Image: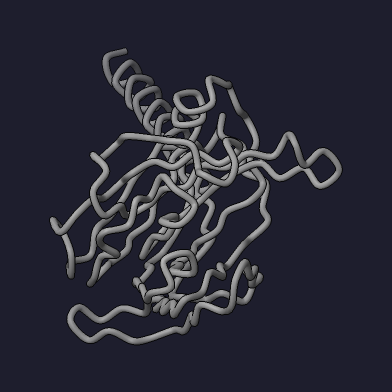
């Protein structure tokens, strides 16, 4: 009888292990799905150009140390961005990840005025409603010249766009910075509104209002569950 009991116990343990392994694999598979890649290796084939003033140059470049493919942006008195339209469920994937590098700041401009509303780098997300444009709203994550990190303010052209300083000043210049923002929480903070879906993501380096030049480098961009 002891042998039979041991055999039964072994079968139970093996079965339990198989069930737990299946659950673990399913959870890992679910987590893997909960990642929405928007920009990888500077592939902009699914992005569209949007010009506000002139043309900012965007091109793929290869870096050597460390080896990686990134997007270079150069603005000369211009403001044009790259836009991708994709619905993101912020209940499932609220976390926006990206990396960027800025070598030179725009200095002396008041970023809260129309004449000074330029940034060497910005990543923005939002809701665009074509037939109810007054309902559209965006968050601009920017590299500011002087604003305190995590402060936010209304864009001088429209309060439907809110600016958040993610990086500021000279600290970190010339070095790659990895960013992580909970977009769902940020919408609640700056618009006092619970938002589930967004449908537009963009990047832009601009210098049209200050009539100067700016530029940046952008790495991969994606949304995840955590």
Which residue is pictured at 38% across the width and 56% down the height? Answer: 98
| Residue 181 placement (x, y as % from top left) | 38, 40
Q: Where on the picture, by quarter, is residue 84? A: bottom right
Q: How is the image coloured?
A: one colour
Classify residue 38 by image quadrant: bottom right
In the picture, measured across the screen, residue 166 lies left or right of residue 16, that is left
Identify the residue at the far top of this view.
Answer: 1
In-front residue for pair 101/90: 101
Q: Depth check: give the residue in front, 47 or 7.
A: 47
Total numbered badges shown on the rendered structure: 0
Quarter containing the N terminus = top left
Is 84 located above or below residue 144 in the figure? below
The foreground one among 168 and 46 is: 168
Side (left or right) of 35 relative to 121 = right
Q: Is residue 57 visible?
A: yes
Identity of the residue drawn at 26% across and 54% down: 145
Side of 159 where 116 appears, left or right: left
Q: Residue furthest left?
A: 171
Q: Find residue 48 and report its image quarter.
A: bottom right
Residue 105's x, y, as percent? 25, 65
Indicate the quadrant containing the C terminus: top left, top right, bottom left or bottom right.
Answer: top left
Residue at horizontal 27%, vertical 67%? 102
Q: Is residue 64 above or below residue 101?
A: below
Q: Residue at x 51, y 58 (%)?
A: 37
Asked if one can make out residue 26 in the rendered structure from this viewpoint, the answer is no
């Amino acid at each position: 009888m002891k042998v039979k009991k041991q055999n039964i116990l072994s079968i139970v343990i093996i079965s339990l292990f198989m069930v737990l392994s299946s659950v673990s694999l399913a959870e890992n598979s679910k987590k893997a799905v909960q990642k929405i890649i928007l920009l990888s290796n500077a592939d902009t084939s699914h992005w569209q150009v949007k010009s506000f003033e002139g043309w900012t140059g965007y091109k793929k470049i290869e870096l050597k140390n460390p080896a990686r493919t990134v997007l270079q942006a150069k603005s000369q008195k211009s403001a044009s961005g790259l836009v991708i339209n994709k619905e993101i469920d912020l209940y499932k994937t609220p976390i926006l990840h990206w990396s960027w590098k800025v070598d030179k700041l725009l200095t002396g401009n008041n970023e809260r005025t129309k004449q000074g509303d330029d940034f060497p780098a910005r990543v923005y997300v939002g809701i665009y409603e074509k037939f109810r444009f007054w309902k559209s709203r965006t968050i601009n994550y920017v590299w500011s010249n002087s604003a305190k990190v995590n402060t936010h303010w209304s864009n001088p052209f429209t309060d439907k766009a809110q600016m958040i300083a993610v990086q500021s000043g000279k600290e970190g210049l010339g070095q790659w910075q990895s960013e992580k923002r909970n977009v769902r929480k940020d919408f609640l903070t700056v618009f006092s509104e619970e938002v589930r879906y967004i449908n537009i993501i963009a990047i832009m380096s601009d210098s049209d209002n200050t009539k100067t030049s700016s530029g940046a480098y952008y790495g991969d961009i994606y949304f995840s569950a955590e």
